[in-house]
Amino acid sequence: MRNKNYVFFVLGILFMLISCASIEKKQEKSSKPNIIFLLSDDQRDNTFGAMGHPIVKSPNVDELINKGVRFSNTYIAEPICASSRAALFTGTYERVNGVGFTSVYSLSESQWKESYPELLRKNGYYTGFIGKFGVEYYTFKGKASEKFDYWRAHDGWSKFWPKGLENCSAYSDLKEDIITPIMGESIEDFLQKTPEDKPFCLSVSFSVPHGSQIMSMHPESEMAEICLEPANNYEKLQGTEFYDTLYRNNVVRIPKETTKDPYRFIPEYMLDQQKGRATQTYIYDYDTISCKEHYIRYYQQISGMDKVIGDMVKSLKEKGLDKNTIIIFASDHGLLMGEYGMGGKALLYDLASKIPCFIYDPRLPESERGRNIKELVSSLDITSTILDYAGIESPKAMQGTSLTPLISGTQKDWRKELFLESFFTGRDNPFCEGIRKGDWKYIRMYRGGFWGYNEADLDFTNKNPGYEQLFNLKDDPKEKNNLIQQYEGSELLAELRGKTANYASDMNKTRVDYSKTHEIALRKKNKNKKTKKNKK
């Protein structure tokens, strides 16, 4: 009998130890913060009220900014859609990962294994993706949904009214009809389905305020599509909170140089505006009437997105998730909207390459909230920051630095300069690279205009730039006065040229090492695209 009681006693102890271990494991999981990464599309810096915009109404985001930390000198690694997203996923420049709209490469499985969603998923996070994935054309052969626990997304471009589009079939059974509220409905669905014993990471990639949304607000009028007719002439928009009369009270102003000669800023031999920008993709920014309509719709869509973000924050609170959920916000790049007489992105002007960025961490002490950190930040830092919050060490290949020490004040020696690049060659765009250092920005350009470049095309070691720009951002924050001729022969220009060349050379060497440890996948050729042998 005594032996029997002893056995029961031992079994009880073992059961208690196992239970304690299980509880500790669950507590360890639950102690990790939830992470929500919000990414807008085509949204340039300073386009929220709390960032100083005089017109845009964004009360929900403003509250997050005022209770969080803003990074007001944040540059996107690649100022064009697919490249910027591949860079955010992998934490690497395009020059290293190779994935771009007009390169010959696609994202490989081995590269994805070191992406932030995959690393979090492997480390116990429940992962979700909502909205514009943006790189599936360049990888996975339609199987991107398998890379997440929750998936409600599309690739390529959606429209303002996305239902019925083949690539937006994931939204067909939802109640909402407009793309941004559809994102909100999907966010709520995700939050309803998150498991209690796992932290989650949700990536929400909004489609707004991208041009595909701007031009499809009024789907029944060709004039409205190119912004020559008010979008709210469309009956379904009338009476809506954001897309009817908001911002239509003549307070919207367009740039003075709208429709003026763009070749005063970048010469025609380097970027011919008639090969895509002025005549096709950004046609509405080359006319004063349609440019103003673009601004109105652009601001409307930012306010519509703000509402969805506010609803998300409210839902987090109702579900008891608000105390342990970090919200990170960024954009995939900025946008020119008539400035310099141009429209579009893929250039290294601040309006195209600088993005809104903030982090809201509910665990942050009250005294640390509402700060504006002005140090130079790269979008690649966001990737490392997400991993840092999750307690995961960044892979060696990642090129960003976690922002958490900068937020806490423990980072004493932050970068003083930042390398910039852009390699989208569509629409006659040039290869661009440069550096931001202190108040100065230097940019050099090489002739692009072809599809299908590889590493050899990005080696400019023995090539002279086709065009250069030098701006003093303190005296000339709008980058209108190119000082390259005035500073020719100066120590400053020699330094900036040398640093740019060194960064580019180091990046090319990094690509060689990267290709030894990561599978490099070639993308299938698109017969409709012009190649190097058949330039525009």
Image (cartoon, grey):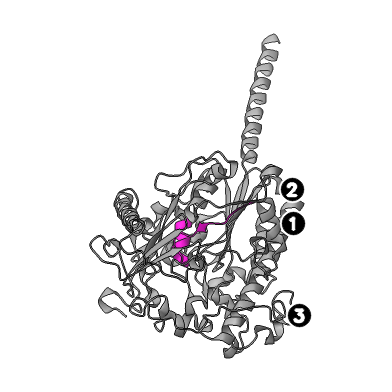
Distance between mark 3 and mark 2 Cα atoms: 34 Å
Q: Residue at x 70, y 14 (%)?
A: 5
Name the quadrant containing residue 220.
Answer: bottom right
Secondary structure type for disc 1 = helix
> Residue 71 lies in magenta, yes or no?
yes
Q: Is residue 271 above or below residue 469?
A: below
The stretch of residues the image draws in magenta is 69-88
In the image, is residue 250 part of the stretch drawn in magenta? no
Q: Residue 45: give x, y in percent of width and height.
A: 57, 64
Amino acid, disc 1: Lys
**Which residue is farthest left?**
462
Do residues under tags 3 and 2 come within 8 Å of each other at their CB atoms?
A: no
| Rendered location of residue 371, percent (x, y) | 64, 50
Residue under numbered circle 3: 239
Image x and y of residue 121, in percent: 53, 48
Q: Callout 2 environment at 10 Å: few (<14), some (14 to 19), or many (20+)? A: few
> Label 2 belongs to which residue?
320
Q: Nearer the viewer, residue 438 or 488?
A: 488
The front one of 517 and 476 is 476
Dot 1 crowding, Cα within 10 Å, few <14, some 14–19, many 20+: some
Q: Quadrant of residue 77?
A: bottom left
Q: Secondary structure at mark 3?
A: loop
Q: Which residue is mark 1?
A: 314
